[in-house]
Every structure is written in C-alpha cells, then in structure tokens.
Amino acid sequence: MPSYLPIVILGAIALGFGVFVLAASHIIGRPRPDARKLSTYECGMPPVGTARERFPIKFYLVCMLFILFDVETAFFYPWALVMDTLGIYGLMAMGTFFLVLAVGFVYEWKVGAMDW
Amino acid sequence: MSGELDLRPLVPAIIVGVTGLVVLLAQAFTPKDRRAPSAPLSLTGLLAALAAVWLLASGGGRGAVLANAVSADAYSLFFQALLLGIAAVAVLLSPSYLRANGLDRGEYYALLLFSVVGMLGLVSSLELVSMFVALEIMSIALYGMAGLYRSRMESQEAALKYFVTGAFSSAFFLYGVALLYGVSGSTSLDRLEWAVSTLTTDSAALALLGAGMLLVGFGFKIASVPFHMWAPDVYEGAPTPATALMSAGVKAAAFGALLRVFGSALHALAGEWQPLVASLAVITMVVGNLAALAQGNLKRMLAFSSVAHAGYVLTALVASPGQAGEAVLFYLVVYGAVNLGAFGTIAALSREGREPLSLGDVAGMAERRPALAAALAVFLVSLTGIPVTAGFVGKFYLFNAAVTAGWVGLALVGVLMSVVSAYYYLRVVVAMYMRDPLGEDTWARVSPSATVALALSAVITLVLGIYPAPVLTLARIAARSLL
C-alpha cells in the first residue's frame, strides 16, 4: 500500500487546489454577471438551440489541429521516459515521426488554416 | 536493435509516402495563381517505387523484418508492383478530369499517394495489427478522396457513407484480430497458423468467431454482398479517377490481405470457412449482377459490376492456396487494367463538370470517336469474359480453381451470372456501335496523359487475353510464397 501514498497525496493536492481557488474567488471576488458570462461556455457556439444553423468551420479546424498536436505530445512523453535505452534507434524513429508532423504543420500554416 | 534494422522491404512504401509529403508541400508553397506540379511529382514517385520493387525482386526479395511484421516475399512484391501500376494509371487519368471539374489541387494527389502507402502495407503485412494500421492508412485517405468534389451533393454523401461503413467494418476487423489473439497469444500470422492447427474444442469456437469477424471486415473492403451497400453510392459520388483507383486498387489490396490470412494462416480451418466464402460468393455474384441490370447510370452499373466481380474472385478461394492464389492474382491484374480503362473512359470525356453517364451519352460514339469507342468496347467485353480478352482467361482460371476443388455448382453459378452480365455490358457496346448519336458531341478531347492511360489498359487487356503465360507464371511464383 505505501506505494499508493504519492497518488493519494496528488489527489489531495488536486482537490485542495480546486477548493482553494473556488473559495478564494468566492471570498475576494466581486461578481458582475451578464448574460454572456452566465452562459454554459463563455466562448464558442450557443450550447442550447437548434443544431441546424450555420457555424464557423474554423472553430472545428482549431479543435482538430489541437487534437493533432495533443496526440503528438502523448507519443513524445513515453519516448522521453525510455530515451536512454532506445538510443539512436529511438531518436531516429521519433525524428521521422516529428518530421511527418512538421510537414503537416508547415502545410496547414501555408494554406492559411491558422488565419482567423 | 539498430544493428538489425532492415527497412528494405518498406522502401517502396517509404518512397510513395515521402512523395506524398513533397506533393503536399509543393501545393502549399505554390502561389495561388500558379499550378503546382503535383501530377508529374506523383508519377515520378510511383515509378521510383516501382523501380524499388523491381530491385527488391531481382535481389530475390527479402524475408520478414521489423519483428516479423512485414516482408518483401514474392507475393508482396507481385501485389506491390500491381498496386503501383494501378496508382500510376490513376494519376495519368487525373489531371484532365480534375481540371474539367475545378478540383485541380495537390491535396488530391497527396491523398492518392497516402492511400497507396496503406495498400502497399496491407499486402506485405505478416501480422494482424500492422495489417489493420495499413488498412486504416488506406481507408482514411480514401474517405477524403471520396468527398473531394465538394460542390456535389453525391460526393458529400459518398464520403460520409464510406466513412461510416468503413469505421464499422474496421471495428469488425479489429474484434476479429482480438479474438484470434485470444486463440494464438500473438498477432503474427505464423503463430496464428501454428495455433489453429492445434485447436481444442474450446479454442476452435473462438478461432471461428475471430475468422468470421475478419471475413466481415474484409467483406466490406472488397464490397461483397451483404457488405456492399456503400459501393454504388461511393463509386458514383467520388471523382471518377478516384473511383477507378478504389475499384481496382482497394479491391486488389484487400484481396491480397484476405488471401494471405485465409489461404495461408487460417488454412487449417478451411473446412469451416470455405462453405461460408462459397455462399458469400454466390449471393455476391447474384445480387451484384441482378442489381447491375437495373442501373441506368454507367458509374453505378460499373459499381455493381465491381461487386459482382468480387463474387467471381471469391469463388476461387475454395481451392487450395496455391491454385487459388494463382487464379486470384492473375484475375486482379486483369480486373485492375479493365476497370481503370472503363472508369477512365468516363473520366477522360469529362468536361465542365459533366461526364457521360447514360446510354444516350455514349450512343453513336463509334462514329465520332472510333478509337475511344473501341477501347471501351474492349473493356466491357473483357468484363463480360468473352474470349480473346483477358477477362475470359481470368474467369477461366477462377472457375477452374473452383471446379478442381470439387465446387462445380459454385463455378456454374459464376458462369450463369457471367451470361446475365453480358446484357448490361453489351448494351453499352450496342449503344456505341448501333445507335445514332443524340445531339452534338460536347465531350472533352481526350488529353495526352489520359490517352496513354487508356491505351495502356486496353493493350494489357488484349495482350493478357492472347498471351497470358508470363503473368500467369509470375502469379504462380508469387502464390507459392503463400504456402
């Protein structure tokens, strides 16, 4: 069981931080609510209403790009942990992976996927 | 680990993949008012990969590498050469069609090349997870290609339908892989072959369930009935050269993997899956041909014909792996050339967003365009399977394999259905040669690159019909590495 102690501590800190932030903003904050602030998401599309309306496609483009690069980091973390044992082979494999993603990144930049 | 790293079997796929990236970058860095050299780049990459296949083959191929996941045995190399050839012809057909329909962007070629990477991987995988990854690389690029014609409703529909049914079939495939892993404790085909030859009663049920799931997954990709519903809509909606690639390339790649898994790894279970495959073949031939009879749209007619042909190929699977392999490999070459030609003729005539899709559109074509009409007639006659064309030789070997294995009834259904198919194929030939043209000839002049592609397909169709021996020998050698 002692090996699980760090996880319990991590959970306690996470919970404590959340409680602390909420409590602090409740005590020292001066709420000035308006309709926009009170909506479920403060940005993006209205969460309630008809789904059959026009929406800016760029919103989804950014989402997709985010997922792409998020997955990329998800692959880099485990590699970073075992980088030493994998040696030059691992470096080459990750380099290839990174290169392919970089080409995709350059492409989307050049075709203007990032221009809002 | 680095000392044993041998990437040689992957070189053709790597060349095609890098070319895809180069095409993508070339498109991105080309000013808006200029045209990126996408088609020449793609063609160069495909031919370079073909040269790499040639070098590998003349070096005697390579054994399994990367933890026994891929190999460049004769079987892989045969398919890789075929797939690269199909892709090269599809690229030749593309520029004029894309320009005529306002789709001329490098992304089309990049997607085409990425899907070819998947196809190459699919036929050279010796391991089920690699096979699945290759299947997905191929399919995801094709979903994009199907939906590339953004201004047409049908294309949107095609992309969505292809994506949904494709994802569905992937789930079946993956579930099958998981069950077979449960049987053998490995995803490698070698281990699987060993495991299914030493089954207990309990694990036999698991293995059969897994094999059935895999068959469903492959059934979607080769468009066999009852997993064919997507094919007509997707073939109709996708840009026509992309349809040509789908019908010729995807079918060849999927059959390549199917035969490796069922003919080789799961051969010990042949007594169990053969009746299943035979019934799939029968309903595929019957439904495909009868549905094709009712089609007024040429692209949909060819789509159902492509379904029917999946049934013909399935009939050979009841034979021994060597004989089935020889017949299937030869037929896929024939089928690739013929289908590229048939869809290619439609694509080559496309002008200002229109293409000849009805019998009226091709009526009297023999008068106005004798060469083109003759080529299309050759393709349609070959699809019917009439002698002197490759289609006859191909079907002969398929049905012969079934008869040798004792499935005479199965071959008989195939022959009868071929007779039925004569009606809808030859109806087009009759319209071209015996009816008067309707109105002006407003179709495009066939571009030089499309002419090369169509001439190549027609010559291959005729040569293989008269002198099939060299390709048959190659197919026999390739099929032998399955055993």
Image (spheres, coloured by chain):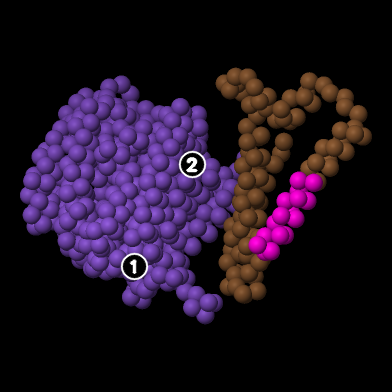
Chain colours: A brown, B purple
The residue positioned 66% from the left and 40% from the top of the image is: A62
Q: Amino acid at mark 1?
A: Arg
Where residue B343 sits: x, y (%)?
32, 40
Q: Nearer the viewer, residue B173 or B146?
A: B173
> Residue beneath label 1, please?
B191
In the rendered image, residue B120 lying in the magenta stretch gets the answer no
Looking at the magenta stretch, what is its main secondary structure?
A: helix
Screen quadrant of the C terminus of chain B: bottom left
- Residue at mark 2 to residue at mark 1: CA–CA distance: 36 Å
On screen, B73 above or below B286? below
> Residue beneath label 2, please?
B144
Splitting the image into 4 quarters, where does residue B323 fall?
Answer: bottom left
Q: Is residue B442 visible?
A: yes
Residue range corresponding to the magenta coloring: A1-16
Where residue B308 sits: x, y (%)?
22, 40
Splitting the image into 4 quarters, where does residue B349 fall?
Answer: top left
